[in-house]
Image (tube, rainbow, N blue to C red):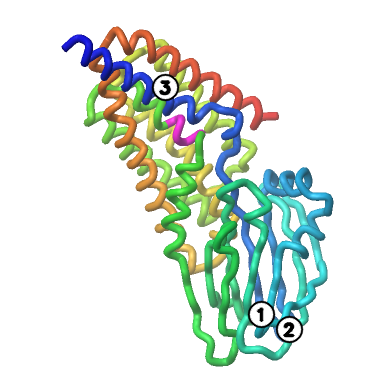
Amino acid sequence: MSAVLNTRGLKAAACLAAAFSFAVPASVWAHDPGLSSLEVRLAPGRVLVTLSLADADARVVASQTTSDLQAFALDSIELLLDGRRLTGVIETTATERDSGTSVSMAYDRLPASRLTVRSAVPSHLTRGHRELLTIRDAGEHLMIERMLDARLNSADIEVGADSQPQIGSGQFFLLGITHILGGYDHLLFLAALLLGVRRLRSVITIVTSFTVAHSLTLSLATLGLVRIPAMVVEPLIAASIVFVGVENLYRGQVDSRGKLTFGFGLVHGFGFASALRELGIGTAGTTIAVPLGLFNAGVEVGQIAVAMLLWPVVHQINARPALRVRLAPVCSLAVVAAGAYWMIERTL
């Protein structure tokens, strides 16, 4: 019996160590796999296209390609009307501190009934990168909304007089899931919180507090009612990770983290909101409700799934005090180290 318990304890230790080490390697310092936006507007006689990249993605383009950002945009975006490829020209390039870099292009619009838009941007950037494609008519009415990636990199739409809108906002639910699963700082924060609890009820309290808090600030920030620059939010998220790691070292097991989680959840919500702002969500008037709600729901499903996967391992560790004494400090130190690295990196 003792051998069986030791084996289970070792397996649990291995699982928990793997969960924490997953969040620490140098390959995952990025906040997420990346989000960009591609806006297409059908103007009289022209098709206007704007490619927007976050600062991190613009730096990837600069480091991995021999061309400048304007040439990259022209080479990566392909427009076809009834199968005929259009030639684009650069109109403007703008760089803003909070919203990254955007390149605007113009294409001559030929008489046609079908428009095809292809983007090679995701395939040139970080694995898992996604790009929000929106196509609007001359009156700024949304005709189509799609999420592109390296595999599904194109969309078609009828542009004749009888064409109807083709909304694909349901993809925001999947985007929310992939965003939280790729947000290693958020996942490390959640895992560190769970490491210090002993009861399933406390896990429910933590997840609920985090959900309510970040949903509140996510909505306020995305709607533009409250806005905090990423240069402030991102170091604060890293600081919250350091705080929880240090608390685990000094307090050990904790069963009352609802208020702490709610407070830091408010900060993390602004981090989630930045992902939607990079896609232009929050500037589309009444169209914001559906993508915001679905994105938020996807984030919740993703983090609940992670919490449920981690809890059996944490519970097994807590059931064996000798194992916890050896393993918990090591994991907490790893949390502090990762959070401190992020805090320094994001501050500088």
Farthest-out residue, left: 1
Res. 284 image quadrant: bottom right
Residue occupying image coordinates x 36% and y 12%: 251
Identify which amino acid the numbered label 2 is placed on: Arg
Prevailing SS of the magenta stretch: helix
Name the N-terminal-most of marks 1 and 2.
1
Q: Which residue is mark 3?
A: 17
Residue 103 image position (x, y, % from top left):
75, 61
Placement of 304 over or under 78, stated as above or below: above
Name the N-terminal-most of marks 3 and 1.
3
Q: Which residues are magenta?
A: 185-189
Which numbered mark, 3 or 1, is in the foreground of this view?
3
Residue 240 image position (x, y, % from top left):
49, 27
Give the Cα separation between the discs numbered 3 and 2.
57 Å
Which numbered mark, 3 or 2, is in the foreground of this view?
3
Q: Which residue is mark 1?
A: 42
The numbered mark at residue 109 is: 2
Tell whether position 188 is magenta: yes
